[in-house]
Image (spheres, rainbow, N blue to C red):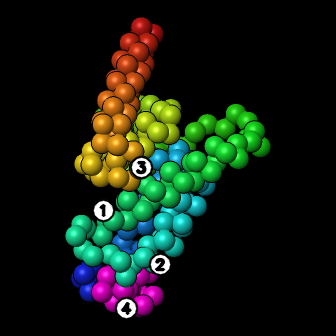
Amino acid sequence: MVDETELITAAQAGDREAFDELVRRTYNDLYTLAARLTGNEEDARDVVQDAYLRAWKGIDRFRGDAQLSTWLYRITANCASTHLSRRRRLRTEPLLPGLDPVEFRHEAQPEAMTETTLDLERIARAVDRLPAKLRSVVVLRDVYGLTHESIAEELGISLSAAKVRLHRARKRLRDEMFEEGRAAHAV
């Protein structure tokens, strides 16, 4: 197995196969991030494709100050933000009304479906219901562990705006989870 650093160096020298291997190694993580940020499988595929295209074009500018995955997360977050802005401007009625949002289930491991998994699904549904600007901040911070500074830079907002959005997103999630839990126990 070739070291990631060697693959990056080869890709920076124009080796497409090395870049393809980097794509194979990072695709699942980037797709998951894009799906969380967009709330839609089709949009997530478009975002990831755009992110890898931008990464290929800019791989020579990757300095290695951060991990490759962090660099790719930032590109993906930017692509998702651009995609969502474009989608808002071009908003139309859905062709197939009544479709449920994408569910993130752990069907590959049915034996692992426990109460914890059900809680994670409730959280995922709650995150999906957040407005895009709040969802992106909470996903970047709580799922991918980016710093407030990195989130602000990625989304093109101030540090204080990133902190405020994260606080609002977490409060909204907490309130929604409390209400949903209370409703479930009342039944």
Point 50% across, 39% down: residue: 132
Is residue 105 visible from the viewing direction of this image? no
| Residues drawn in magenta | 7-20
Tag 1's secondary structure? Answer: helix
* Category of crowding for the residue at label 3, using alpha-carbon neighbours closer than 10 angstroms: few (below 14), some (14–19), many (at least 20): some
Callout 3 amino acid: Leu
Spatial separation of the CA atoms under disc 1 and disc 4: 21 Å
Residue that label 2 marks: 57
- Badge 3 or badge 1: first in the primary sequence: 1
Q: Position of residue 146 (x, y in %)?
A: 28, 51
Q: Nearer the viewer, residue 89 or 1?
A: 89
Q: Residue at x 48, y 66 (%)?
A: 51
Q: Secondary structure at mark 4?
A: loop
Element class at badge 3: helix
Residue assigned mark 4: 13
Confirm or deny contact between disc 2 and disc 3 (CB under 8 A): no
List the residue tagged with mark 1. 70
